[in-house]
Image (cartoon, rainbow, N blue to C red):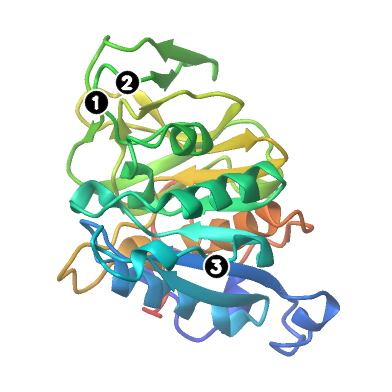
Amino acid sequence: MLRATAISLLLLLGECSATSPARSCAADAPRIKILIVDGYSNHDWQRTTQLLRGILEPTGLFEISVSTAPAKKDDPSSADWRPAFERYDVVLLNCNNLGGGPTWPQPAREAFERFVRGGGGVFVFHSANNSFAEWEEYNRIIGLGWRKKDYGWAITVNEDGSLQRIPPGEGNGTGHGPRTDRVIHRLGDHSIHAGLPRQWKTPAIEVYTYARGPAENLTVLSWAEDEATHTRWPIEWTVEYGKGRVYNSTFGHVWRGEKDPVGVRCAGFQTVLARALHWLAKRPVPETVPNDFPDEKVTLLRPLP
């Protein structure tokens, strides 16, 4: 693996030319308002939020706020917790009750559904697609998630790029093998991927097998092979929910005690992160490809935010 050291993060994100000051590009348009919602997870959600802020804030392109959900249903603050989703362009989900947390209070759930249905953007960060299996509208919003064998469709990618749907009850529940360096293969020509290589390698990713869900109004953007079976499984997908846009992927694992979370250091992930947030906010997606964007042979890491 190679490290990018001398070039600024902003330039690596590909937002500005080499002659532009770090803040001048941000001045061309209002900053994208992002609300990170965290609070509990079986992953290291506190550090994940810190890392995401460390990646995004130095660019000057994003205005980041954080709302931390009460981690216990009987928390006195739970009844009053209802983020003002409507004030933001994108909600970035970093909350996962698979680790024992509660479902959001009903008013917060309804407000979130209205936000997305009315045209808001949602970035489902890694383990957030494990969350809230009991919340049916959330399942529709994320499209596919970490679910049991009998829930929803699973999707594989055929050799010709077409999709194969696996019905509920067939195959297995969602899982993954060891985190490994895998080649990401683009499907189609989505604006998030404009100008990027058709194949590029990312480090230590979890390739979800049998991610399941309603899979309604869903577009698969990329896939990778499961190392054990060589089956092609989705890595990135988008969902249309009402007027809203949703981006979901398995990039960005940050485990508790993980000293060097290389998944979030990946130049490919960081580029796609910034581009996806622009697309979700219905802003023009930057098409500049950073100099350190990986190819299919080697992963490229940036300094830890």
Pointers 2 and 1 in contact (C-beta within 8 Å)? yes
Closest to the observer, 245 or 60: 245
User: Which element type, helix, strand or loop, lies under badge 1?
Assistant: loop
Residue 28 sits in quarter: bottom right
Please state which amino acid type lies under the numbered disc 2.
Answer: Tyr
Q: Residues within 10 Å of mark 3 (few under 14, many from 20)?
A: many
- Quarter of the image for the C terminus: give it: bottom left
- CA gap, disc 3 and disc 1: 29 Å
Q: Dot 2 corresponds to which residue?
A: 151
- Residue at 64% over, 75% down: 62
Image disc number at residue 148: 1
Against 134, residue 68 (above or below) is below
Could you tell me residue 227's position as x and y percent?
24, 32
Relative depth, front residue between 293 and 134: 134
Decide which of 178, 134 is in the foreground and name it.
134
Q: Which residue type does callout 1 highlight?
A: Lys
Provide the residue designation for mark 3: 35
The percent coordinates of residue 293 (x first, y second) are 54, 60
Determine whether 25 is above or below 33 in the image: below
